[in-house]
Image: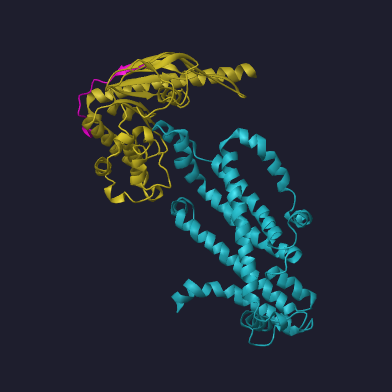
Chain colours: A cyan, B yellow
Amino acid sequence: MARWFHKYGIYLVFPLLVIALWQAMAMAGFYRRQVFPGPGDVIMVWLDLMFGNLDLAGRYAGSWADHALASTWRVFAGFAWGAALGIFLGLLIGLSRLVEKIIDPTIQVLRNVPVTAWVPLSLVFFGIGSKPAIFLIGLGAFFPAVLNTTHGVRQVNQTLFKAATMMGATQYELVKRVILPAAMPSVMTGVRLSMGIAWVLVVVAEILAVRSGLGYLLNDAYQFYRNDVVMAAMISVGVLGYLSDRLVVLIRDRALEWNRLETYNG
Amino acid sequence: MAEFVIRNVHKVFDSRAGHVVALRDISLGVTDNEFVAIVGASGCGKTTLLNLVAGFEQPTQGEVLINGQKIAGPGPDRGVVFQQSALFPWLSVRENIRFGPTLAVNSHRLDEGRIDGLLQRVGLANFQHHYPAQLSGGMRQRAAIASVLAIDPEVLLMDEPFGALDSLTRSVMQDFILEILDENRKTVLLITHDITEAIYVADRVVIMAGHPGRLRELVPIDLPRPRSLATQSTKRFLELRQYVISIVREEMAKATELEEEIVGSSL
């Protein structure tokens, strides 16, 4: 029992505390139940959103899987192009001072424009639908990937570089067998940040530009004073974002076991 | 067969901090299969000298020749063992040793049986699938030496290879390197600040003086081989050690005086 608690139970303590606090605040009755529903209400409406058999979520009942799937698809589509382009350009910038001079200043200027500021233009160019959402998400995912990849390429250990040159490595071999592997931990940090920002932006994009997805569900329910559905949608985004992050971490730890061994408390 | 010659070499570094003469008029010939150790106070240009032979740096004046050919850059004919073992942290011990032979220029040398032999030789056969982070300092340096031997260089350049190890491990590693060279003779240049180590392993000890870096004295080490720990307590060994230490200390004292003069004149 004690061992079980240390292995798994410890993860539940804080979430349960948060839920208990939420329940207590809901029961205190500062707001009407419709305005600030408690965890029990939200869980029930969530179940109805998923399975549509409790008659609690009204016209939203049973729509959860469609919305969740739509959002997840957009996140991964936007993340894929944004992170891939970011890694590619990050490698070029990191490897070549010339490429850095040509494209890095532009990236550094655009980086300061919030992705939400791109919403009007993206609607003009792509219309209403998945396209502007995937564009915005990719744009947001691009910046952490490009910055961290550049950093990773630039901080390759000098001695390793010398050792490979001494053994007769060609430029191509240096890139492929020294610089790329050495940059991987930093690249993966960028990828992880990209994934996080993708879930933030999918909600923004779906509120503004699409008629499906968890962001759309959240905004639509808000318009109809269904705060229980709003909160269920919020938690859904949180959980799916968390699962995506775990997926990235799992892939990273599998691929970079050496890095875990190199670092303190890895 | 490998010999190299350093001829009238000057090396100057220009940086924002100023104009530093790292090496002044250095000439040194190292013959085939000779083991030369370079000692001197830190900052005397020992590592710069090794970097010139390795090809990581080019002389400002003069030339460095290997078998009569001018050294244009680093290459697999000159294997370098660095102070901080240059193992790739993302490769296992075995993959690290295979790194050199799997490069295009050395591909004719790739032979898994030889890799097995090297792993056995450096005592890491049972650790071949471990990552460098899982090894002790001595094991890491043995793996690094094996990875350099894997490309079978004609010249072995070692830059304080045991400097980061504890003294016990260091003395074991000195015997290890002597055994390795006994089996497969190579021309060796060793940079060290450990005078006992230099005399114990080398055929000739070169004493450098600093500011600017120059050769102070060449001391032939006429101790018989094979050498063992007992060699270090022979009368001849102690005489040589005393002699080398006295010169190094004399140079260090001069350097300190010089610094005091410079500080004094600026007051």
Q: Report if residue B223 lies within the magenta region.
A: yes
At a point 60% along the width and 60% down the height, the residue shown is A76
Would residue A260 be found to the left or right of residue A96 on screen? left
Is B130 or A226 nearer to us in this picture? A226
Magenta residue span: B217-230
Q: Say above or below: B138 vs A57.
A: above
Q: Quadrant of residue A226?
A: bottom right
Q: Report if residue B50 lies within the magenta region.
A: no
Would residue A152 be found to the left or right of residue B142 on screen? right
Q: Quadrant of residue A138?
A: bottom right
Is A110 or B256 nearer to us in this picture? A110
At a point 32% along the width and 34% down the height, the residue shown is B151
Quadrant including the N terminus of chain A: bottom left
Q: Give percent across and percent down for residue A45.
A: 67, 82
Is A205 or B100 nearer to us in this picture? A205
Q: Give percent across and percent down for residue B8.
A: 43, 11
- Residue B257 appearing in the image: yes
- Residue B194 appearing in the image: no
At a point 59% along the width and 66% down the height, the residue shown is A242
| Outermost residue to the bottom | A54
Is B40 or A60 nearer to us in this picture? A60
Q: Give percent across and percent down for residue A121.
A: 77, 53
Q: Give percent across and percent down for residue B11.
A: 49, 18
